[in-house]
Image (spheres, rainbow, N blue to C red):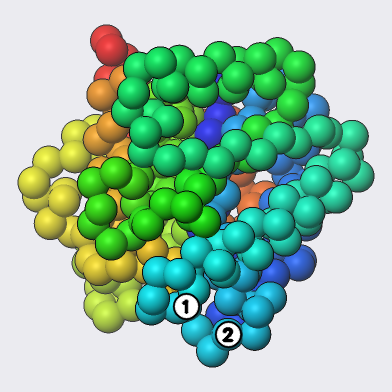
Amino acid sequence: MKIVVKVGTSTLAHSTGRLNIRRVEELVKVLSDLKNAGHQIILVSSGAIGMGVGKLNLPGRPADMPTKQAAAAVGQCELMYTYDRLFGQYGHNVAQILLTREDVDFPGRRRNFENVMGRLLELNVLPIVNENDAVATDEVGVSTTIGENDTLSAIVAGCVGAGLLVILSDIDGLYTADPRRDADARLIPEVRAVTPEVEALAGGTGSALGSGGMATKLKAAKLVMAGGCDMVIANGREPEKLYDIAAGRPVGTRFIGRKDA
C-alpha cells in the first residue's frame, strides 16, 4: 500500500523545541520496517520552525515573519540531517521535497511534482515533504501558501494516489468533545462523512510550537475521502501503532474514503 504519514511538531519535539530523540528514532524504525514489508512510504514532516526555535535558543515560536522564516531555514537542516542519518541506519535513502502553493496549484508544476515523486518511489526512496517555510509566508492566511501540513499531507496523498493518510498528532483522534476539558468526551472510532455536525466538534489550534488543530485535520479528511483514500488521526506518542493502522485495525479515528471515487 502507498501510505502518507504526516507527523506534527508536537510529536517530533519537546515543548522546548528540541528534538524528542527517543520518539523520532522509534518513528523512523517503524516506518523503515513498514517499508521493508513492501509498503511505499511518504513522510510529510512538520517541525522545521519548532526545531529552529530550539536550535537558535529562541524563547518561543517567533511572532514576526522574518524570524519565523529564519527558524525554518535552520530547523529544516536539522530535520533532514536527523532523518538522513536515522533512515540510513536501516538502509533507506531519503529525499527532501519543499513545496509552495504554486507547486501544487499550477498544472505544469504539479505534474513535475507528481513525476518526481513517482520516480523517487520507483527508486525505492522515501520522500520527505514539507512546505518551503523559508520563503513562503505561511500560516497567516496568505492565499499563495498552503498554510499547514495537515492540508499539505492531503494534497500529497492525492498527488501520489495514496490508499492511506495517517496524521500523527498530540491527540488520540476525533472526540465528541474536547477531552482536555470534558471528562465525558468519547473517541469516535470511524467517520464516513465529514458533516457540519462533525466539523462542529473541531476545537482551536494545536500546540504552542505547531500550527494545526482538529479543524485542519477535518479539512484534510474531506480532501482525501473524496478521492477514495482513508485517513487516520492517531497519537504520535506511540509510533508502533502504525503497524495496526496499516493493517486496518482500529486505532484513533479512521475516516473512510469513498470507494466509488
Extreme bottom residue here? 59
As drawn, is 134 to the left or to the right of 232?
Answer: right
Q: Are marks 1 and 2 in contact (CB under 8 Å)?
A: yes
**Residue drawn where x is 38% and y is 64% of the image:** 211
Q: Which image quadrant for residue 230?
A: top left
Where residue 197 sits: x, y (%)? 9, 50
The image's mark for residue 58 is 2
Q: CA distance from mark 1 to mark 2?
A: 8 Å
Disc 1 on helix, strand or loop?
loop
Disc 2 on helix, strand or loop?
loop
Check disc 1 and report the residue beneath it: 61
Mark 2 burial class by Cα count in 10 Å: few <14, some 14-19, many 20+: some
Most foreground residue, 30 or 251: 30
Where residue 111 sits: x, y (%)? 45, 15
Where residue 183 sits: x, y (%)? 29, 78
Above/below status of 260 relative to 201: above
